[in-house]
Amino acid sequence: MNSSEGKPQETSATAEIVLVSGQVYRVEGRARDVERIILDAARGSIMQLAWLTDADTGNELGINPEHVVLLRAPIAQTPHQRGGSMASPEH
């Protein structure tokens, strides 16, 4: 029996990066970890890129940390936001 049978598939964490150009990338990793990679590149040598993995394609991305204007973690959706119904609380 496979050890992963019966266990839910674990989804990988992702973060979104918005550049000054308006281009948006969804990358693998928690937002805090992605932030650390971007900060490390910014503090590194001149023109050091932040190397990340595109969550949609799996391709490696080299991002200039000086061009990053926004980093955000995905927001968990409530059942109501997904189109499900939410029972109203009774008093």
Image (cartoon, grey):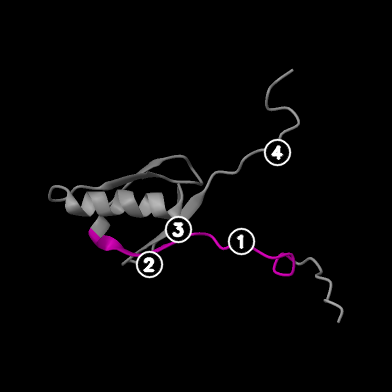
Name the side, left or right, on which 29 lies relative to 51. right
Q: Nearer the viewer, mark 1 or mark 2?
A: 1
Vertical relation: 90 (above or below) 22: below
Q: Mark 4 and mark 2 in contact (Cβ < 8 Å)?
A: no
Among numbered discs 2 and 3, the one appearing first in the sequence: 3
Q: What is the C-alpha distance between the residues marked 1 and 4?
A: 18 Å
Mark sitting earlier along the chain (1/2): 2
Q: Quadrant of the N terminus?
A: top right
Q: Position of residue 21 (x, y in %)?
A: 33, 66
Q: Which residue is mark 3?
A: 16
> From the viewer's perspective, is residue 58 above or below residue 15?
above
Residue type beneath disc 3: Glu
> Which residue corresponds to mark 1?
76
- Rendered location of residue 60, percent (x, y): 37, 40
Q: Where does the magenta region start and end?
A: 66-82
Tell me how far mark 3 sits from mark 4, CA to CA.
24 Å
Mark 4, residue position = 8
Picture disc at residue 52: none
Q: Amino acid at mark 1?
A: Ala
Earlier along the polypeptide chain: callout 3 or callout 4?
A: 4
Q: Residue at x 24, y 48 (%)?
A: 49
In the rendered image, which quarter is residue 72 located in? bottom left
Residue at left 72%, top 64%? 82
Circle 1 crowding by C-alpha within 10 Å: few under 14, some 14–19, many from 20: few
